[in-house]
Image (cartoon, helix red, strand yellow):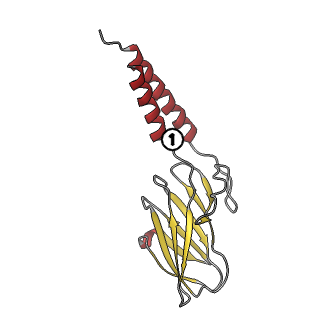
């Protein structure tokens, strides 16, 4: 009986606690000076992403609805809602690296967009390069509440004995 309660508590914690994973970028360079950039977003994340685009390049399209992206002053701002990946097309790209940062509004974590195949580097809650440090509003009380609920459920189920 207690094995089921323990399993239920562990499943609750695993499903509720978000995984700290970063966002990766791949670049498919076309022969005509265009490039298609694909960002892979972890499941369950609701990130805001800012990409710094090299000088001289222009964003010509994005896979997100028009209300969820903005191209301004050399920066592409993306609001990603329930999308496993986002792609956008650049023209006029000749040289220079694309850099970016992200903030996950579901967990409060933040980090740097990393090129595909590279280590994600640190995923933090205390700020990333170019982003101000902000506390994770309300996330620790929520986690503590889930842990307490899981323990209370396990205690209740352990205390219930069948005759």
Residue drawn at x 43%, y 62% is: 83
Q: Is residue 118 above or below residue 12?
A: below
Q: Is residue 71 above or below residue 110?
A: below
Residue 122 on image: x %, y %:
66, 53
Residue 104 on image: x %, y %:
54, 54
Q: Quadrant of the C terminus?
A: top left
Residue drawn at x 47%, y 68% is: 86
As helix, strand or loop, the secondary structure at mark 1 comes to loop
Q: Quadrant of residue 138?
A: top right
User: How many circles with numbers are drawn on the protein?
Assistant: 1
Closer to the camera, 155 or 50?
155
Q: Can residue 153 be seen from the camera position used here?
A: no
Residue picked out by circle 1: 17
Q: Can residue 78 be seen from the camera position used here?
A: yes
Residue drawn at x 56%, y 83% is: 58
Residue that extends furthest to the left in the rendered view of this protein:
163
Residue 100 on image: x %, y %:
62, 67
Q: Quadrant of the N terminus?
A: top left
Please indicate whether residue 91 sits to the left or right of residue 118 in the image.
Answer: left
Q: Quadrant of residue 94?
A: bottom right
């Amino acid at each position: 009986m207690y094995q089921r309660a323990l399993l239920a508590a562990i499943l609750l914690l695993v499903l509720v606690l978000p995984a700290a994973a970063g966002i990766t970028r791949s670049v498919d360079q076309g022969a005509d000076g265009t490039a298609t950039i694909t960002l892979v977003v972890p499941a369950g994340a609701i990130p805001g992403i800012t990409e710094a685009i090299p000088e001289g390049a222009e964003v010509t399209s994005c896979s997100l609805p028009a209300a969820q992206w903005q191209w301004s002053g050399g920066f592409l701002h993306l609001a990603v809602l329930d999308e496993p990946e986002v792609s956008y097309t650049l023209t006029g790209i000749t040289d220079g690296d694309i850099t970016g940062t992200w903030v996950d509004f579901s967990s409060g974590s933040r980090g740097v967009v990393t090129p595909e195949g590279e280590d994600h580097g640190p995923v933090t809650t205390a700020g990333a390069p170019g982003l101000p440090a902000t506390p994770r509003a309300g996330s620790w009380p929520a986690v503590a509440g889930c842990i307490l609920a899981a323990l209370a459920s396990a205690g209740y189920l352990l205390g219930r004995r069948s005759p």
